[in-house]
Image (cartoon, rainbow, N blue to C red):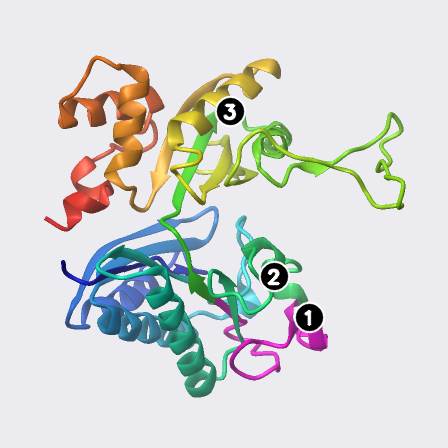
């Protein structure tokens, strides 16, 4: 079995095609790497890049892309809807075949050490590569975003795992780690009201929300701690955003373990919550790639009599409304098809 690692770095640039192409080129020029896609979003001002290859080649490509982003992206002028910490915001390494999670943790450490030493960028490790429990969650590391990074670096608790504990104004900081295959999945609402999208996100995400009383004040337990109400879906992160290009609100979801909560379960749960608020769900989109199994699961959910793989994928795409914003092409969106 070939040793294949996926890398899905997110860069804080979604509008300047010259910068996006330069970063993509830095990856494509590395032998042993197959460039899959670069998916920019103007509203988020962010590009999700996906590539796969041999572990050593993927590591080299990730470094070169980070180097190019530090050269071309200036975080002092960056604005966008999506939370971010740096020019190269997050670099996850994902085992695909012939490699273990432990192998990918090692890659994250090697990447972080090289970027920290050679580029002088503060590096934080998250998920399976996290050095402390507090750093497992990406949103915890990102808290305060780029604008709060300079102050954060002065806190000894937030000393970087690699690189200097000094503020890199132009590049910010980068988070890297190893994780399971994450499906970036957005559900589209028939409204442009982000308050509704945020409300749905709070209801479904695993971390939930702080319980409040009738006056809007946090409810405290016997120890004086705020009471948290978990959301309805496990292994799900979510937030509400406005997609200005289409003037619609989205529930932006990260399915961090699609075997626990696959796309169709998240879709149906958002539909249920949206209906309770008088809003319809109009479709959804997968950003980046998805494992084939996730769509086969959806296809079987919507038509249990089907057994043909192509038909199962087709019914899943139709029922999830994956072509509402852009035509869904299984050959480009399913990772196993990219490896053929």
Question: In which quarter of the view is residue 316 placed?
Answer: top left
Q: Return the residue nearer the eye: 3 or 273.
A: 3
Q: Does 254 sit above or below residue 60?
A: above
Mark 2 sits on what residue?
Answer: 133
Mark 3 sits on what residue?
Answer: 270
Residues shaded magenta: 149-175
Q: Is residue 210 left or right of residue 111?
A: right
Disc 1 packing (10 Å; few <14; some 14–19; many ≥20)? many
Classify the position of the N terminus by image quarter.
bottom left
Residue visible at 49% across and 84% down?
120
Q: Is residue 332 left or right of residue 77?
A: left
**Which label is found at residue 152?**
1
Question: In which quarter of the view is residue 208 placed?
Answer: top right
Question: In which quarter of the view is residue 246 placed?
Answer: top left
Mark 3 or mark 2, which has the lower sequence index? 2
Residue visible at 16% across and 22% down?
311
Q: How many marks?
A: 3
Disc 2 packing (10 Å; few <14; some 14–19; many ≥20)? few
Q: Return the residue nearer the eye: 328 or 181.
A: 181
Residue visible at 53% across and 23% down?
191
Q: CA distance from mark 1 to mark 3?
A: 35 Å
| Mark 3 element type | helix
- Which one is closest to the eye, mark 1 or mark 2? 2
């Amino acid at each position: 079995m070939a040793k294949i690692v996926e890398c899905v770095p997110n860069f804080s640039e979604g509008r300047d095609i010259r910068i996006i192409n330069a970063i993509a080129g830095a990856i494509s020029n590395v032998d042993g790497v197959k460039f899959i896609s670069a998916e920019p979003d103007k509203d988020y001002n962010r590009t999700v890049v996906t590539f796969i290859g041999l572990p050593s080649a993927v590591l080299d490509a990730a470094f070169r892309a980070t180097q190019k982003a530090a050269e071309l992206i200036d975080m002092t002028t960056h604005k966008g809807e999506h939370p971010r910490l740096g020019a190269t915001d997050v670099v996850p390494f994902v085992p695909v075949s012939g490699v273990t999670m432990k192998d990918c943790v090692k890659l994250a450490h090697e990447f972080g050490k090289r970027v920290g030493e050679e580029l002088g960028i503060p590096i934080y490790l998250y998920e399976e590569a996290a050095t402390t429990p507090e750093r497992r969650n990406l949103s915890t590391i990102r808290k305060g975003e780029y604008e709060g990074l300079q102050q954060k670096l002065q806190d000894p608790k937030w000393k970087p795992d690699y690189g200097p504990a000094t503020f890199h104004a132009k590049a910010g900081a980068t988070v890297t780690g190893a994780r399971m295959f994450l499906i970036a999945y957005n559900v589209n609402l028939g409204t442009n009201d982000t308050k509704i999208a945020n409300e749905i996100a709070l209801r479904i995400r695993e971390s939930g929300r702080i319980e409040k009383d009738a006056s809007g004040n946090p409810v405290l337990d016997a120890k004086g701690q705020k009471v948290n109400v978990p959301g309805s879906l496990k292994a799900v992160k979510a937030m509400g955003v406005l997609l200005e290009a289409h003037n619609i609100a989205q529930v932006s979801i990260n399915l961090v373990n699609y075997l626990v909560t696959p796309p169709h379960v998240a879709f149906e749960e958002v539909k249920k919550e949206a209906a309770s608020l008088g809003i319809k769900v109009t479709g959804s989109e997968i950003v980046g790639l998805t494992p084939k199994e996730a769509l086969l699961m959806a296809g079987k959910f919507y038509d249990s009599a089907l057994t043909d793989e192509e038909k199962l994928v087709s019914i899943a795409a139709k029922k999830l409304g994956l072509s509402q914003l852009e035509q869904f092409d299984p050959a480009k969106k399913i990772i196993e098809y990219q490896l053929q």
